[in-house]
Amino acid sequence: MISIDPPDNDLEEPGPEAETRAFTIPAALHGERLDRAIAVLVPEFSRSYLQQLLEAGAVRLLGREARKPSAKVRAGDTGEVELRPTPQSQAFQAEDIALDVVFEDEHLLVIDKPAGLVVHPAAGHWSGTLLNGLLGRDRQAAGLPRAGIVHRLDKDTSGLMVVARTRSAMDRLVAMIAARDVTRQYIALAHRPWQGGDQRRVEAPIGRDPRNRLRMAVVDPARHPGKPAATQFTLLQQAEAGCLVRATLETGRTHQIRVHMAHIGHPLLGDSLYGGNAGAGLPRQALHAFHLAFPHPVTGEPLSLRSPPPADLRDAMLAWGLRYNEPEWLTSQPPAAA
């Protein structure tokens, strides 16, 4: 599940590695918008990148800084573009980041990700990510798409993730996740006591929230783009303030557990994006990937790994009067998928 951040178009300040490209507006572009003219004159770079250069003041026209994309250009106008490196262009760099590896062999490793660690470089987080740490830890990760990352956790979700170390293992893991051969189970603290039976399967398509592009939502596919999504929920414990549930993913949509829990009236503790309130001393959404099980993609050996909840989540459970009893979380099996 992928974190969604607001756009960030900041460019780095000019440095010795920047290249200045001079240009002259030809007759064919007379009267054209500045941004479109530059896209024609510097075709090897994307329009979004050139737009960022305009906004950053890296384009000069007739000796003056030009920031207005809609400005009209005239035949014979001269200018220059300073092709500065962007955060995106420098995102896939190796960094020395401590990673908690709970399983490793020549084909794959399993990471216990802490809350606060972004998985993949994106707007606002072009460095300091799990991907940067994987590149710094293992040279062969540079030869794999996304450094071997086959699924994600939100920035503020903690817990287990499997990462491939070879292309064959990566292809197999991707196929296994699509075929639902990988069990991914989470524990979550949610607002309001649980109503109804202890087990509940939620099948509701998820897409971008049409009213807020930074959120996902349960949508009507006839009206808004969305993908099928299904989550199995099992009540583990009740409290006056809310409930502790186990969530088992059948699909892996962005923010799936958070969206489905909010949809059924139980937003996660601390999940302000989906209606949850802060409480119990927890500074993030109360979601932890505690169990990961799958056959080894190369040897076929069954693997089953568990991660106890981190201290902040355990303290929140205690604040709500809930018991920490991890083995019990696995004993009540979810209903079979339809």
Image (cartoon, helix red, strand yellow):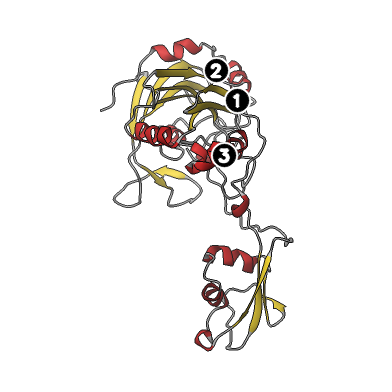
Q: Amino acid at mark 2?
A: Pro
Q: Amino acid at mark 3?
A: Leu
Question: Mark 3 or mark 2: which comes first in sequence?
Answer: 3
Disc 1 from disc 2: Cα separation: 13 Å
Residue at left 65%, top 83%?
A: 78
At mark 3, the secondary structure is: helix
| Left or right, residue 20 beside residue 295 | right
At mark 2, the secondary structure is: loop
Residue sitting nearer the eye, 231 or 111: 111
Residue at left 25%, top 28%?
A: 338
> In which quadrant of the rendered view does residue 138 lie?
top right
Q: Is residue 123 above or below residue 136?
A: below
Residue carrying label 3: 131
Residue sitting nearer the eye, 29 or 301: 301
On residue 308, which mark appears?
Answer: 2
Q: Amino acid at mark 1?
A: Asp
Residue carrying label 1: 100
> In which quadrant of the rendered view does residue 68 lie?
bottom right
Q: Is residue 336 above or below residue 207?
A: above
The percent position of residue 249, horizontal first and vertical second, equals 39, 29
